[in-house]
């Protein structure tokens, strides 16, 4: 049975992490530094993505000041704020992020998605976070209205 993503959004709350974040482009030889940063930032959002280009580390300012001092970055993107779902999110809901990404992207806001097993996350440039939060709040209200009407 397919789960309607808008019904999930109607019951969703969001968390905006308070820290400033960066996406750091690293070579595979920097893996131990990336893992050390992840281990240090236990109360903050962080992630490592390994792909054909190497490593992408998303980490907060404070952690990277401590653990990135000896690391050779290939590039750095940001600063970002991270907005995470903070409610029940069935893993098998299909197309959950698409409608909210369309809203944000349609307003000229880049929102990079990252899916976790329990929560989904959006990297949003810090300069856009206030507009994004308003759009996200309005989006949830619209989803609630649709749900109440049975659509």
Image (cartoon, rainbow, N blue to C red):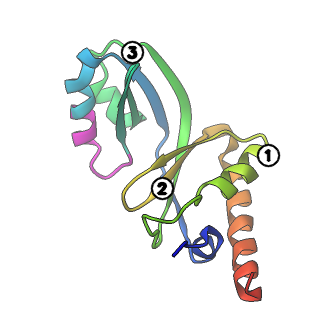
Q: Which residues are magenta?
A: 36-45
Q: Nearer the viewer, residue 104 or 67?
A: 104
Circle 2 is placed at which residue position? 120
* Dot placed on the residue nearer the N-terminal end, 1 or 3: 3
Question: Residue furthest toward the front?
Answer: 1
Q: Is residue 40 magenta?
A: yes
Cα–Cα gap, marks 1 and 3: 32 Å
Which type of secondary structure does the marked residue at label 1 adopt? Answer: helix
Residue 63, image x, y percentages: 33, 35
Q: Report the side of 47 relative to 142 (left or right).
A: left
Residue 39 placement: quadrant: top left
- The 10 Å Cα crowd at callout 3, few under 14, some 14 to 19, many 20 or more, is few
Cα–Cα gap, marks 2 and 1: 20 Å
Of discs 1 and 3, which sits in the foreground? 1
Which type of secondary structure does the marked residue at label 2 adopt? Answer: strand
Circle 3 is placed at which residue position? 73
Residue 18, image x, y percentages: 48, 51
Circle 1 is placed at which residue position? 106
Question: Residue furthest toward the right?
Answer: 107
Residue 56 seen anywhere in this rendered image of the structure: yes
Residue 40 placement: quadrant: top left
Identify the residue shown where x is 55% and y is 33%: 79
Identify the image quadrant of the C terminus.
Answer: bottom right
Would you place residue 151 above or below residue 92 in this image? below
- The 10 Å Cα crowd at callout 2, few under 14, some 14 to 19, many 20 or more, is some
Identify the residue shown where x is 69% and y is 57%: 99
Residue 38, image x, y percentages: 27, 39
């Amino acid at each position: 049975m397919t789960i309607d993503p808008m019904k999930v959004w109607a019951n969703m709350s969001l968390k905006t992490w308070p820290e400033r974040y960066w996406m750091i482009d690293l070579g595979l030889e920097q893996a131990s530094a990336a893992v050390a940063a992840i281990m240090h930032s236990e109360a903050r959002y962080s992630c490592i993505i390994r792909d054909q280009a190497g490593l992408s580390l998303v980490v907060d300012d404070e952690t990277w000041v401590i653990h990135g001092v000896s690391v050779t970055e290939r590039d750095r993107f940001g600063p970002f704020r991270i907005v995470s779902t903070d409610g029940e999110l069935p893993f098998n809901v299909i197309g959950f992020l698409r409608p909210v990404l369309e809203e944000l992207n349609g307003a000229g806001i880049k929102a990079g998605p990252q899916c976790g097993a329990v929560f989904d996350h959006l990297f949003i440039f810090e300069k856009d976070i206030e507009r994004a939060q308003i759009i996200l709040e309005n989006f949830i209200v619209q989803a609630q209205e649709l749900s109440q009407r049975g659509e």
